[in-house]
Image: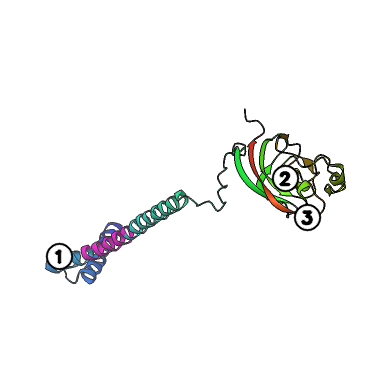
Amino acid sequence: MRIEEDHTSAEMERLRVRRLWRAFAGGTDPSGPRSMLGRGLVASAVLAVLLAAGTFVAGVIGATTSSNVSGGSEAEVAVTTTAAPTPSTEPEPPPTNPPLPPTTKPPEHVNVAVSSTVVWTDTGVDVSAGDVIQVEATGTVAAAVGDPRTYVGPDGSLNPEFVGANRDENGVKVGGGHAALIGMVGENGKPFLIGASNTIDVDTDGRLLLGVNDGGLDNNDGQFDVTLNVRRAGDS
């Protein structure tokens, strides 16, 4: 009896499996046409799952590649930007000019007419300490028009009656002949006697002025013609 029961149980199990297969495959025979359709549906479902998985993986790979390319472009832009030179805003120092060599005044040769009615005649010659002036003068002036004794040359008159009327300039009484040729360097300098021919060693800087050795010029007449040769300090 036990053997028959076991055989009946196995048969019932096989029938149950067969019914389940028919329900899934739509037929009574696992090897029939409906069974083949069921297997085709299962294969299609598996293929759809595989395609979906492949699409997901491709999307992940594409996103990663795009991120890498984008990052590389930004890096290149950054490198290019930082490599660009930055212009300097500091001004360039001005060019330095070499110092000019010291200049010396050239030698001068000047002719001057010195009127006996002008207190000081400007020669237009600037002199400096160390210059040497060679003076030559000619001509006649009258210290008192109408008195022949006062008609003199550049050396003036040594008549005692007239010497007392010599020029008093800047507190200095000029000696020598009356109405003689005199000079001064600068308006506030000290007057000095020159005469018809003289060499003057200049000891100060200024404009050379010439005149006649007379304190009163209102009754004078005539002029001296003077030639100046100036040798500058340091010239041989």
Res. 149 visible in picture: yes
Point 78% across, 55% down: residue? 217
Q: Nearer the viewer, mark 1 or mark 2?
A: 2
Residue corresponding to mark 3: 217
What secondary structure is the stretch in magenta mostly built from? helix
Mark 3 lies on a secondary structure that is: loop
Give the mark nearer the N terminus: 1 vs 3.
1
Point 81% across, 54% down: residue? 216
Gap in Å between the C-alphas at discs 1 and 2? 136 Å
Q: Which residues are magenta?
A: 43-58
Mark 3 crowd level (few <14, some 14–19, many ≥20, 10 Å Cα): some
Residue corresponding to mark 2: 206
Q: Does residue 205 lie above or below 28 as drawn? A: above
Image quadrant containing the C terminus:
top right
In front of the other: 77 or 14:
77
Residue 138 left/right relative to 53: right
- What residue type is disc 1 on? Met
Locate residue 88, reporting x and y percent.
53, 51
In front of the other: 131 or 115:
115
